[in-house]
Image (spheres, rainbow, N blue to C red):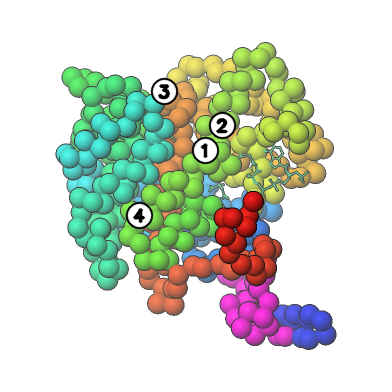
Amino acid sequence: MSVEAKLEVNGQTWTLPALEGSEGEKAVNISDLRLSTGYITLDEGYGNTGSCISKITFIDGEKGILRYRGIPIEELAEKSTFVETAYLIIYGSLPTDSQLAAFSDLLTQYSMLHEDMKFHFEGFPASAHPMAILSAMINAASCFDDKIMHWQWKNLKDFEAAAAKLISQVRTIAAYAYRKSRGLPFIYPKRTYKYTRNFLHMMFSAPDEDFEVKPEVAKALDLIFLLHADHEQNCSTSTVRMVASSQANLFASCSAGVCALWGPLHGGANQAVLEMLEQIHQTGDDGSRFIAAAKDKNSGKKLMGFGHRVYKNYDPRAKIIKKACDEVLAHLNISDPLLDIAKHLEAAALKDPYFVERKLYPNVDFYSGIIMRAIGIPVEMFPVIFAIGRMPGWIANYKEIMEDPKSRISRPRQVYIGKTLNHYVSLEQRQ
Ligand code: SDX
């Protein structure tokens, strides 16, 4: 049944086509609005604007629902792994045994960086933020692969290799960035180690002794990667799609995604949450002073890890991570005062009218840092862990654009409020 929308402006009426998604999401298609009406729309921050039609991830913010290719995040968190979920997100269905083995083999095959990449790491100061290194080195890595550098989307086999290379090498780059920041020698990936175990090996092993990875720790980090794997058209995924729409290569598009993710309002929030909790702890505040500041617009403070553009209910990922927090800390026999502060902040905020009225709940970043801190990952690496997890989602969105024969370059319009026509004035006349 075709649905139509009517737009009336100054007595003139136009009919616009409307459409409905498979989960009942409704949209007015304004693709021809300017041509037929002379009007554009304005939606600063894109809170009401659909940028694409996608089949990858579904979120219902009111109900706190998140599904990758239709499968609820709760089921994947309990039954799947990051690598299997990455395959699901990129290729659209859960892999068979042989498909999973082939994908895993590709990740192993591509885990090493080109040896000359080490010279690039040497150029960074030890204090360089690992997100700056990650974004730069993803582009640097593409320079060692002609097929990626001179990308022409034609061949699925080439795509599969490029996708596996990016998912695998982002881990190696991240670990090398950490080692570089600590003045430690790089630890090469081991072909016998699976994805997350290999990352922890590259992060924490010594040249002469492999880091002993507790299964609970590897599982907890694998869960964090899985929970971050995609999240429809968030800021960084929209950035990847924007860059991909110009037919830039996969690595360049995802390198741009890293930069967008780095912001403290987005993927940098997990680092900001830990810094916030540390500050509360060091000032002896039980959280109530900080909450008061977060409600005061003039304080410049926000309750980091709280609120979401889409979720107006509890972020389902936050629920899962909070439970994993308790389990990991119990396994490691760690009692972290920052977790107690986080739980106190959550309990206080969920009763506070300011947060309740604005439907501000904990998001994925509120508890994730507690687990990463318990594992021994330094706070500046938290957004990097987010980026490793989000890589499959960015790659899937890239693939969706490349497979769309109607895909065109993204080029939004604007409402201009600057000076109207004026003319050049010579220097003498400007005094
Ligand atoms: C991620 O989009 C995604 O899917 C992102 C993500 C993903 O997986 O990709 O889920 C990952 O980025 C999670 C969000 C991480 N960021 C933070 O935790 C930073 C803190 N949160 C806020 O900055 C904010 O909530 C945002 C950025 C997440 C959402 O911002 P919006 O949708 O633009 O909402 P807003 O800033 O317009 O806030 C609406 C009101 C405002 O008050 P009023 O003007 O109505 O009085 O709520 C207030 C805001 O001041 N508010 C907060 C707050 N978040 C919103 N007040 C205090 N603390 C907060 N955290």
Q: Nearer the viewer, mark 4 or mark 2?
A: 4
Q: Quadrant of residue 189?
A: top left
The residue singled out by tag 2 in the image is 272
Tell me which residue sits at (67%, 81%) in the image: 38
| Residue type highlighted by circle 2 | Ala
Q: Nearer the viewer, mark 3 or mark 1?
A: 1
Q: Nearer the viewer, mark 2 or mark 3?
A: 2
User: From where the camera sits, is residue 223 visible?
Assistant: no
- 146 with respect to 45 (left or right): left
The residue singled out by tag 3 in the image is 376
Instruction: Count the numbered circles shown.
Output: 4
**Residue nearest the observer in this picture, 100 or 306:** 306
The crowding category of the residue bearing disc 1, from other C-alpha atoms within 10 Å (few below 14, some 14 to 19, many at least 20), is many
Q: Nearer the viewer, mark 4 or mark 1?
A: 4
Mark 3 to mark 1: distance in Å?
18 Å
The crowding category of the residue bearing disc 3, from other C-alpha atoms within 10 Å (few below 14, some 14 to 19, many at least 20), is few
x and y, in percent, of residue 258 in the image:
43, 46
Contact between labelled residues 1 and 2, with CB atoms less than 8 Å apart: yes
Where the N terminus falls, by quadrant?
Answer: bottom right
